[in-house]
Amino acid sequence: MANSIVVDGSRMNKIIKLDTYNMQATCQCGTPLQVLEDQLRALGYTTGHSPQSKPLAQLGGLVATRSIGQFSTLYGGIEEMVVGLEAVFPNGHIARIKNVPRRAAGPDIRHVVIGNEGALCFITEVTVKIYKFMPENNILLGYTLDRMKTGFEILRQVMVNGYRPSVARLYDPEDADYHFSHFSEGRCVLIFMAEGPKAIAEATAAAIKEIVARHPECQEVDSRYIQVWFDNLNWDASDVAEERAEILETKNIGNTTEISADWEKINVIYEACVERIRREVPDMTLVGGHSSHSYINGTNLYFVHYYNVVDCKPEEELTKYHLPIKTIIVEETLKAGGAICHHHGVGKYRTPWIDQEHGSAYYILETLKRAFDPRGIMNKGTIFKG
Amino acid sequence: MIAMNILVCFKVTPDLDQLPPDGWEVDRAALTVETGFVKAMINPYDESALELALRFAEDAPGPVKLTALTVGDRSADRYLKMLYALKFDRAVRLETGADLRFTPEGIAAAIAAFVSRNPHQLIIMGRQSGVGDNAATPLLAAEKLGWPCIAHVTEIRSLQEDLLKVRAQADDGFLSYAARPPLVAAVGNVPHAYLRVPTLKERLGVREKKVEIVAAALPAEEGAGCTLTGLDVIDRRRAGLKIEGATPREKARALYELYLKERLAKL
Amino acid sequence: MKYTVVLNGCSRNIYSQAEETASFVAENLGSAPPGRCILFYSDAQNKEELIALSPAESLLLVKVKQRDPEYYLSLLTGLLQNDTSGLYLFPGDLCGSELAIRLAHRLGGSSLAAVEKIEEDGEELHCYKTVYSGYLRARLSLRQKPYCLSIARGRDTRRRRKAVKVLKFEELDATGFEKGSPLGEPEYEEEANGGLELEEAPFILVAGQGVNSREKITRLKEIAAEMGATFGVSRPVAMSAWAPLHILIGVSGVIARPQLCIAVGVSGAAAFFAGIEKSKYIVAVNIDELAPLVQSADVVVIDDYEAVLEELCRLIKEQPSLP
């Protein structure tokens, strides 16, 4: 980070307009999502966007990282929510994309900005769609089952048959044991939440029950387990601090890597990665994962990997554990034709694989970089190899 | 050299902080609160006891055998299996089917009975656990066994063969003992005592090991115990007035001017 | 019912021991016949001062040469063999709470720790105490005498009570007593880090895990001193060894009862809150609006604590009449 300036937009935190007739909210980039969401909920609305970073994340960053939230299976990722925006380009040009519901006036230029991770421009203002907030209609469903393959098939059937629960999550036994040991009994866990207008929530829940019933290995779980889990989903500053203390003491540290793939490939990638990490990387204490964002044509996989740091200087941890794990996951995902970054963004650590990820289409991405940031001053080393 | 047998008693308890404020509903007939839907954990003081025992075994001059014991239902089994992976020699659960919340006498008697059948030289356990908050089990276990007991232990290690160094918190300082077994150590607040995490290989290595389950009624308390005759939620809510301000400094000023200045003057 | 209060005069917290037991007696045993106090003390102490602390009209002052619980336990067991008290009361500190439980067993009675209130009801004694990590209050009934209870800490002793005049005074020199336990005499190390002051302090500043480094904790301790507040920490902070154990506030540590408490970066689970709930006025400073403490505080600042506290400290220091 030598010879760098960090531009911090967090003081540009004004909520400019909450338009509940046109269903749009406009804020400056430094507006914390929690603040926007709290104000909307007080009026009976929601952004529908609920990443775990909600208490800390700001609108500009959420757009720049192509973020996704816990209810995305219904509301979509940030790309579905953004209406218009304003961004500043490296040459000083201020571009304002106006708020319209949809248009075909050339390619959708918002997608140049959404997900650029500060490598092409700096976002200063964002308008997102808003939705009616109807939590009273939420229906939570939970099941345990034996096999991930069955779980993926159930997720697929729910999506393919036209249902959009806001939460659809499938945990493998290791990851399930970490979160749900009080009821998972060493099995996989499947969780759904149906949300929205009453009739739709009820129809969605009924359909899910019917689909699950076709797989006799599934056992229903008291929804109160799921309710408690849901209520405790997000962490406050205290929880983060406690985790940090625990990590320092036990020298046991965990991290996550998220990828996506179509229905056919997802279980193949899951099994290959879990098997290889367990076999090839030393001192692992937990290797597992869950799917948490589904689409009609596939789903994501969120690998969770914990290890004890043994006989290892801090600077060596990267090469002894971190990179080998990432490399395995990236390799298996690329081999199967999945995407190596589902929603955490490229950052710096997946930049080495960015051209493999895009293949011949990398040309489009790198041309954008050359066009907007010829001198390479923007977030060097992020997305594009520095 | 004969092995030193160390018994660590632990309790699995629900993570009560996970219950939302409106989740605290007392069943008046049964005098219980539903805590089954909340994730469980090892009682934090017992967690320190387990970790202290593992460190003791690592540093001891002679051989040490570690036994983990819990009185409870099968929700404790996954923790017992995990303790095998951490190299505990025995992992035992006493299945009593009883309501164990306010029965430290009975639990202490069960522990004493176990020790009389399975000789141990050192018993380590947490000083209290978060549902009953009885803060009595280790003390009563020592009394029933007729053993010395050191409460509020913060440190325990081998000084030399058959001599233990034990440090305990007192109300206005610390007490350091050179103690000979047998001994009951009740563990209090111990800095830096999170339980270590077993690796997958370690867990795989003990996959076939079974938890020892002993079914037996909880010993009767012969009148010395207590009976639960009432249970109520405590309402701790206060006004929670939020201070407004554009910046932290503005808020500090508002807080001071409106609410603290006068109060501080009166102190 | 005849009662006896047992106090450990060797410990520097003897004043709060005496106040708490006196307050408990006044509120729960007002109509009982006057009770007795047994008070241990050592050579180093001022007898007259200790006599003035007695919460009972009858006082037995016992001179001891050792200061560990097992020693007191053996001594008490011997002393009380023929005693007819139905109730033995101990302060709820570390020593008292251990003695109550163990003594009950040796005397063939029953015990409870951290009792807030009692009601005699024929052959039963109903005791009220908090359970479930401080979320609930239980009524637990004992049947077997003698009842040995340790008192819940944090009693409101501000209300004036009549000073008790000792009418019957006895002394016993037990310095030759052998405790008859295989446990040798421990070495005692005094704690000078402010734990005792915290219990009595009228103004406290408490740091929780939101203050997420040793350096920041140290800085807050300085700010506390500059503001004229006594410093305490929540359990996670003490467990990281960023502050000494004796200033840990909560169910397993100090129960404070200040006029004013400022809690900074504390999420406020019940086990912690039990340590500050007797405060007359609670200010919470936290970045997270959903932290439980926000509901249980009188006034709340939702923001990053550092800037708020530095400014608050400056304002307090500027104030002409600093306490």
Image (spheres, rainbow, N blue to C red):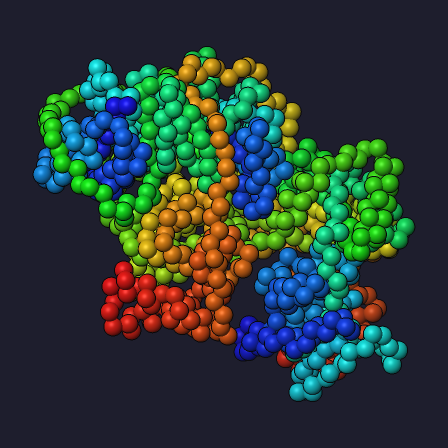
Task: State which quarter of the image contains the C terminus of chain B.
Answer: bottom left
Question: Looking at this view, is C285 or A313 the one in front?
Answer: C285
Q: Position of residue A305 (x, y in %)?
A: 64, 47
Question: Looking at this view, is B126 or A13 the one in front?
Answer: A13
Whether residue B55 is visible, yes or no, is no
Q: Position of residue A251 (x, y in %)?
A: 51, 46
Horizontal side of A296 relative to A369 (left or right) equals right
Q: Residue at x 32, y 66 (%)?
A: B262
Task: State which quarter of the image contains the N terminus of chain B.
Answer: top left
Q: Residue at x 12, y 22 (%)?
A: C176
Q: Is residue A3 above or below residue C216?
A: below
Horizontal side of A209 relative to B249 (left or right) equals right
Q: Residue furthest right?
A: A161
Q: Residue furthest top?
A: B117
Q: Position of residue C269 (x, y in %)?
A: 48, 47
Dividing the picture into quadrants, the one containing residue A189 is top right
Q: Residue at x 63, y 67 (%)?
A: A39
Q: Residue at x 25, y 23 (%)?
A: C2
Q: Is residue B79 above or below residue A27?
A: above
Q: Is residue A341 above or below residue C96?
A: below
Whether residue A62 is visible, yes or no, is yes
Q: Position of residue A71 (x, y in %)?
A: 73, 56
Q: Is residue A185 above or below residue A76?
A: above
Question: Looking at this view, is C237 or C315 the one in front?
Answer: C315
